[in-house]
Amino acid sequence: MLSFSRLGDFNLIVKILKYILGFIFLYAGASKIFEPMLFKAVIQNYFSMPDLLALIIAIVVPWVQILAALSLFFNWNVLYSSGLLFAMSIFFFVLMVINYGQFLPFGCGCFGFRGEEVVGIYHVARDFSIAVLAGIIFYDSYIKIQGQKRKKSFSIEY
């Protein structure tokens, strides 16, 4: 039987949550990457903006989601990638709250394009949950980096 300390249990849970967050954003990015024109239409459904700007966003956002997810998987710059995903999650959550009850002709665009749908409590709760998850990973990464800085500042060499 394996025995973990409380800190070990917490680190294992955070590691699992980090992979879950990575899979969520890997799937979200991959579901949009091959249909930039449809994603552009979804973006323009939320915001009034020029076609070129919407297209640039539609091309860049899925790649950012995929690269940030891969960064979590490979434990590379986790603070920055989790911070970016946290900020994106908060943005998506606010977007769902603002559009609550609205009809979206192409769906919300979060995880592909499912056709017509109305933004409901499911969308709001889902995006809130993802934002909380991203916040936990970001906070844990921040605390770990602060701890590493503290250890370096207290080390004395003779």
Image: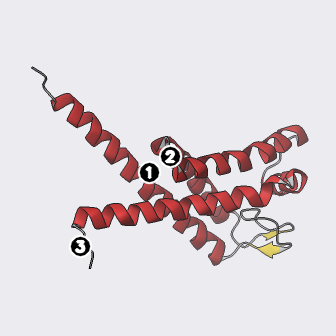
Disc 1 designates what residue?
138
Pointer 3 or 2: first along the chain = 3
Q: Position of residue 136 (x, y in %)?
A: 42, 58
Left or right, 21 with respect to 109, comes to left
Is 117 placed above or below 48 here? below
Marker disc for residue 38 = none
Q: Nearer the viewer, residue 93 or 67?
A: 67
The residues tagged by marks 3 and 2 sit, at their Cα atoms, a distance apart of 32 Å
Count neighbours of disc 1 (C-alpha within 10 A) and say few if under 14, some if 14 to 19, many if 20 or more. Answer: many
Q: Quadrant of residue 79?
A: top left
Disc 2 designates what residue?
83
The residues tagged by marks 3 and 1 sit, at their Cα atoms, a distance apart of 27 Å
How many numbered callouts? Answer: 3
Disc 3 designates what residue?
3
Residue located 57% across and 72% down the image: 125
Is 132 placed above or below 56 here? below
Question: What amino acid type should be assigned to the residue bearing mark 3?
Answer: Ser
